[in-house]
Image: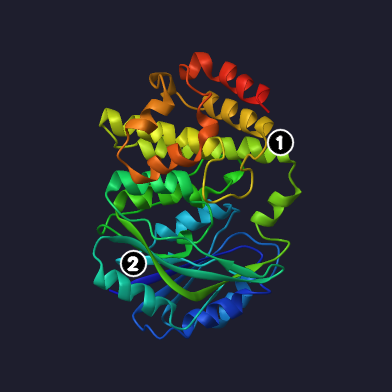
Amino acid sequence: MTTISVCVPVYNGAAFIVETLECIAAQTFADFNVLVSVDRSDDSSLQACGVFATDRRFQIIEQPVRLGWIANVNALIDRVEAPFFCITPHDDLLDPRYLEAMHGVHRSDPTAACVFSDIECFGERDGHILQADILGARHERVLDVLLNHYAAVAFRGVVRRQGASDRPYVPMGIPEDFASDTAWMIGIAQRGTLRRVPELLYRKRFIATSVHAAWSRWTQSELLRLYAALVAACTRLALDGATDATEREELMVAGLLRAAGYTKQHGWGTPGTPFEVASVVSNFSALTTDFERISDPMETLRRTHVAVLQEGLKHHAMLAPIRSTWRNGVMQSLQRLLGAT
C-alpha cells in the first residue's frame, strides 16, 4: 500500500492541470499515488489528464455528471486507501519537497492530524498565506479553529486517516458551499493537532474563474448571510461529541465571538461595522438551537481557563453589551450595541 494519496479535483482545468500533475509527479517523496477526479467539464480537462494515463501512479476518474467541488473532493476521499492523503486543486503547484516535508512531521509527531506548509500566492494575487499551528488538548484545538481559522491553508495539508474505513469527508449543506473547507478543519482538529511547516512549499494560483473569485461579485449583504451560515455550521460541528456542559458553553460563546467578527483571521463576510455585526449575529442565532442556555457570555469568558477564550475577554470588550439570555435578549443587546456607536 502506498503511504500518501494525492487527490486532485478537476473542473474546467485544462489550462492548468498538466502543470499541476507534473509538479506532483516530480515529488522527492516516492511512495505516493495520485487520484484525479475530472468533474463533468466544458473543456478538454479529461484529455489533458490523459497524458498521465500511462504513469502507474496516476488514476484518472471521469465523473459522468457535474458533482460540484465539495462532492468531487468527497468522491476522491472515498477512494483513498493510503494512511495519508491531501487535496490539491487542479491549478495549484507543489514544491518537489512538499510531500517529503509534510510526511516527515507526521512521522515525528503521531498526534498530528494534518500537516501543512505556508502558501505562496501567484497569478492575479501576490503574497503569502500563513496559518499558525493549532495545538493543545482536543477542546482547545477545536476552540482555536472555531475562533481563528479561515484561510484555506490546512485544507491543502496532508491529513492522517484513523483506519482503513476512515473517510473524513468535507461537510456538505453550507449554502453555496461557502468556505466549507473551514468547516472541515473543525473535524480535523477533533482528531489531533494541526502542524505548520514554516516554508513556502505550496503555490496557490489566483484566477478569475476560481470558486472563491466568484465571492467578490456577491453583495456584502449576501456575504454576511453566508458567513453567518458558515459560523453556525462550524459551531454545530464543534459541539459534536462535546458532552461536558462547561465545554459546550465555551464552544457556543466561541461561536458567538466568531459571528460577531472577533477573530484573528478576517476574510470574506467577516462583519466589521456594528450594523454588519448585528446582521450576522441575528442570522447566526436563527440558525442555532442551544444558545438559550447561555445566560451571560461575558461570565463564561471571565471564568474560562482556555487561553484562546481568555484572549477574547481581554481584546473584545464590544461583546460586553451582549449579556442577556440568548434567544430572548440578543436583538435588544445588539440594539444597545448599535446605539452606542
Is residue 232 in sight in this rendering? Answer: no
Residue 89 lies left or right of residue 29; in this view the side is: right
Q: Residue furthest top?
A: 328
For the C terminus, the image quarter is top right
The residue sitting at 49% across, 17% down in the picture is: 327
Neighbours of disc 2 within 10 Å: few (<14), some (14-19), many (20+): many
Q: Amino acid at mark 1?
A: Ser
- Model colouring: rainbow
Q: Which mark is residue 84?
A: 2
Q: Which mark is residue 27?
A: none
Q: Amino acid at mark 2?
A: Phe
Residue 171 lies left or right of residue 121; in this view the side is: left
Residue 172 lies left or right of residue 339; in this view the side is: left
Task: Indicate the secondary structure of the residue bearing disc 2.
Answer: strand
Task: Indicate the secondary structure of the residue bearing disc 1.
Answer: helix
**What residue did someone put label 1 on?**
221
For the N terminus, the image quarter is bottom left
Q: Is residue 70 above or below residue 222?
A: below
Which of the marked residues, 1 or 2, is nearer the chain's N terminus? 2
Neighbours of disc 1 within 10 Å: few (<14), some (14-19), many (20+): few
The residue sitting at 73% across, 62% down in the picture is: 208
Q: Quadrant of residue 160?
A: bottom left
Q: Quadrant of residue 211?
A: bottom right
Is residue 115 in sight in this rendering? Answer: yes
Residue 176, given in percent of the width and then of the height, sits at 62, 43
Q: Is residue 336 above or below residue 147?
A: above
